[in-house]
Amino acid sequence: MAQAPSVADRIHRVYSDLLEESVQRFLESLGKLNRAYLSAVEEKVLTLLESEYSNR
């Protein structure tokens, strides 16, 4: 069974210097969390960012 990508892997795939500063800061703050999971709201926002920026 394939393992789900880690939070760090997901952030790395979305992060770019071309993103808006607020999006960059949000992703950076997620990367600094001292836990291996996201809250429900964090998960929703990261999922939205992945769908928005995956084709760039």
Image: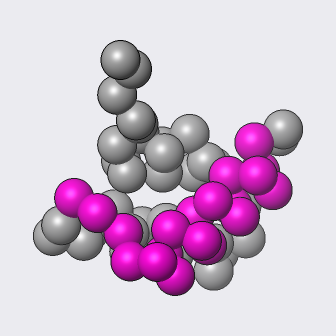
Rendered-image quadrant of the C terminus:
top right
Taking the view exactly as shown, the residue that stands out farthest to the left is 34
Residue 39 in sight in this render: yes
* Image position, residue 43 (x, y; %): 50, 68
Compare residues 18 and 39 and report the one nearer the observer: 39
Residue at the farthest top position:
1
Q: Is residue 17 left or right of residue 39?
A: right
Q: Residue at x 63, y 59 (%)?
A: 47
Residue at image coords 67%, 52%: 50
Residue 7: x percent and y percent? 37, 51
Q: Is residue 40 above or below residue 47?
A: below
Q: How many marks?
A: 0
Residue 53 forms part of the magenta stretch: yes
Could one spot residue 24 in this view of the protein? no
Q: Is residue 45 magenta-colored? A: yes
Q: How is the image coloured?
A: one colour
Vertical arrangement, residue 1 with respect to residue 34, above or below: above
16 relative position to 27: left or right: right
Residue at left 84%, top 38%? 55
Q: Main secondary structure of the magenta part?
A: helix
Q: How far from the left and from the top, in percent, is residue 3?
A: 34, 28
Q: Position of residue 1 (x, y in %)?
A: 35, 17
Q: Which residues are magenta?
A: 36-54
> Residue visible at 75% across and 42% down?
54
Relative to 30, say whether 18 is above or below. above
